[in-house]
Image: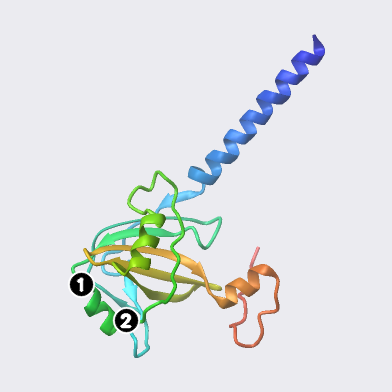
């Protein structure tokens, strides 16, 4: 009898731990980003300089403090792809990350297909928004916009343990 009871306690504990880990990964760390009208969507001009805000509406975003690449955002814009491409810095080969299923406006797989078939284009929004992380914005030909964070070259080197070298900015000090 003690063996059965012990087995049940172990199974229940394992199921509870698994459920908690699932919840924490999918729901627990995320929070809604408070919109800042006129500042949420900005792109880097081709000529250089700071990011410039673009016209957008229906902005919604999520983020998490547990990772710098968990940011996802959706919005609408009236700007055409040709207008954007003539003014802002394009990103070649952008690969959108997926979002949790409950954040329904951001479908990374559909967006990836749109980028591949040319019905969407991607632009650099902010370089080093966090150390080694850039914000990328993609906009479809029907005006739907998406934003997410990706590791840049310095971030890939820093997070895989490779020496970053002189081409990367110094890593900020972590205060505790």
Give x and y (percent) for residue 65.
52, 57
Q: Identify the residue at image location x=34%, y=76%.
A: 43
Q: Nearer the viewer, residue 31 or 82?
A: 82
- Outermost residue toward the front in this view: 117
Residue 151, compared with residue 104, is above or below; it is below
Q: Quadrant of the N terminus?
A: top right
SS state under label 1: loop
Residue 84 in view: yes
Q: Is residue 126 left or right of residue 79?
A: right
Mark pair 1, 2: CA separation: 12 Å
Q: Position of residue 8 (x, y in %)?
A: 71, 19
Q: Earlier in the sequence, mark 1 or mark 2?
A: 1
Looking at the rendered structure, the secondary structure element under dot 2 is: loop
Residue at figure coordinates x 47%, y 50% from the top left: 30
Q: Nearer the viewer, residue 78 or 117?
A: 117
**CB contact under 8 Å: marks 1 and 2:** no
- Which mark, by number, is residue 88? 2
How busy is the neighbourhood of tag 1: few (under 14 within 10 Å), some, or many (20 plus)?
Answer: some
Q: Residues within 10 Å of mark 2 (few under 14, many from 20)?
A: many
Residue at 41 percent across and 55 percent down: it is 109
Q: Which residue is under mark 1?
A: 79
Which of the 4 quarters of the picture holds residue 147?
bottom left
Q: Position of residue 91 (x, y in %)?
A: 41, 77
Give me the residue at 53% from left, 74% from top. 152
Q: How many marks?
A: 2
């Amino acid at each position: 009898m003690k063996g059965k009871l012990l087995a049940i306690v172990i199974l229940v504990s394992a199921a509870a731990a698994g459920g908690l880990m699932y919840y924490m990964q999918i729901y627990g760390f995320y929070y809604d980003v408070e919109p800042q009208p006129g500042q949420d969507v900005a792109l880097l001009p081709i000529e250089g300089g700071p990011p410039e805000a673009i016209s957008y509406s229906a902005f919604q975003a999520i983020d998490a403090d547990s990772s710098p690449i968990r940011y996802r955002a959706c919005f609408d814009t009236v700007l055409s792809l040709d207008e954007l491409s003539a003014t802002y810095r394009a990103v070649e080969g952008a690969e959108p990350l997926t979002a949790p299923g409950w954040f329904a406006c951001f479908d990374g797989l559909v967006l990836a297909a749109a980028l591949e078939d040319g019905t969407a284009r991607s632009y650099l929004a902010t370089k080093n928004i966090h150390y080694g992380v850039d914000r990328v914005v993609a906009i479809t030909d029907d005006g739907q916009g998406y934003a997410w964070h990706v590791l840049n070259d310095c971030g890939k080197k820093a997070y895989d343990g490779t020496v970053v070298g002189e081409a990367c900015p110094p890593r900020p000090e972590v205060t505790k």
